[in-house]
């Protein structure tokens, strides 16, 4: 397993944990979502934090970040940089329509035993070889943390034939944002038919405070009925209550959200089933996240 793959497993595992069970959330924050003309740029922050849209834990990694142009073809990240608490990059919006920016990740997590000793598979074994436990991404120990090394996680291929108590979970996660230059378009919302996907009815760049928006969720291309969705406004650092909404999709997979105020919101959906594609895995956990901008009327 390469260090890059190990990082994807870690990130996918983080995104697959329900919001209520994890204080750390991975998010993307654009400098804006609606732009005029084709001479604009959007700057995007990527981070994992306790409070939404506040840099207090660790940066989001950019190795697997992608851009989709309005016609669905690949775009380009420009000026990427990763610091101690956040990553940042630019996208030049040189074509009219709606752009998609984000991550698609998958992996396997779990455990097994050999001679009674439990071993972990996936993202719980620590950072890649050469990285120090608790240190920054560059591989050197942080001040005062010494040089203790942690072992890299194991992969499914590392499970020996004599392993017992094999418990594997397949993970699949998407974390996306949408920005529009000029008139909004919909090509970037075309579903792939794999995993948990976002198929909005209301365009995500046309959200207004006090008005209802409708978003459809799909699992393997079919309506995802009865899934739990968290909708949380940013700025928790400056208020006592989180102020989030816990909603559920209908039988048609549609979620209806009425926005109480303008601002940036983090939306997160999670789904678990048994339709795995990985040998020996018995559970599949899927997650979808996006950051939405709600404007004043």
Image (cartoon, rainbow, N blue to C red):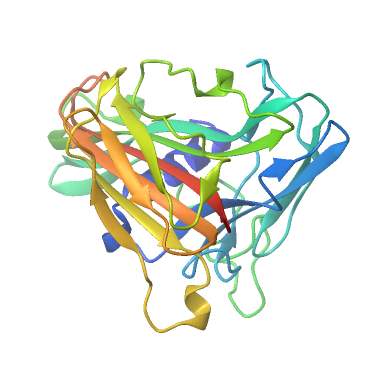
Q: Is residue 224 above or below residue 111?
A: above
Q: Position of residue 38 (x, y in %)?
A: 84, 31
Q: Position of residue 194 (x, y in %)?
A: 36, 19
Residue at image position (68%, 64%) is 84
Q: Quadrant of residue 69?
A: top right
Q: Is residue 247 above or below residue 78?
A: below
Residue at image position (56%, 22%) is 186
Work out which residue is located at the far right of the displayed protein and give it: 39
Q: Compare residues 87 and 121 and report the one nearer the observer.
A: 87
Q: Quadrant of residue 4?
A: top right
Residue at image position (57%, 56%) is 297
Q: Taking 267 as reference, is 282 left or right? A: left
Q: Taking 100 as reference, is 245 left or right? A: left
Residue at image position (52%, 46%) is 207
Q: Taking 207 as reference, is 70 left or right? A: right
Q: Position of residue 73 (x, y in %)?
A: 67, 15
């Amino acid at each position: 397993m390469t260090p890059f793959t190990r990082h994807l497993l870690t990130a996918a595992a983080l995104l697959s944990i329900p919001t209520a069970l994890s204080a750390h959330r991975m998010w993307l924050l654009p400098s804006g979502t609606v732009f005029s003309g084709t001479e604009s740029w959007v700057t995007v922050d990527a981070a994992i934090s306790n409070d939404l849209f506040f840099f207090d834990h660790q940066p989001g990694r950019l190795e697997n970040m992608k851009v989709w142009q309005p016609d669905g073809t690949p775009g380009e990240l420009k000026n990427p940089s990763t610091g101690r608490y956040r990553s940042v990059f630019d996208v030049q919006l040189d074509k009219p329509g709606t752009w998609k920016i984000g991550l698609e990740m998958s992996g396997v997590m779990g455990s097994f035993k050999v001679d009674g000793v439990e071993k972990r598979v996936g993202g719980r074994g620590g950072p890649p070889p050469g990285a120090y436990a608790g240190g920054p991404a560059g591989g050197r120990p942080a001040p005062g943390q010494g040089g203790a090394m942690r072992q890299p996680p194991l992969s499914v291929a590392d499970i020996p034939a004599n392993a017992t108590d094999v418990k594997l979970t397949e993970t699949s996660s998407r974390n996306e944002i949408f920005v529009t230059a000029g008139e909004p378009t919909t090509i970037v919302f075309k579903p792939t038919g794999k995993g948990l996907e976002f198929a909005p009815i209301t365009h995500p760049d046309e959200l207004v405070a006090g008005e209802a928006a409708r978003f459809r969720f799909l699992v393997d291309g079919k309506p995802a009925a009865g899934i739990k969705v968290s909708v949380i406004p940013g700025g928790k650092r400056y208020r006592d209550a989180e102020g989030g909404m816990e909603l559920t999709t209908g039988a048609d997979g549609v979620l209806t959200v009425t926005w109480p105020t303008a601002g940036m919101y983090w939306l997160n959906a999670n789904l678990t089933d048994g339709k795995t594609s990985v040998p020996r895995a018995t559970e599949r956990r899927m997650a979808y996240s996006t950051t939405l901008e709600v404007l004043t009327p």
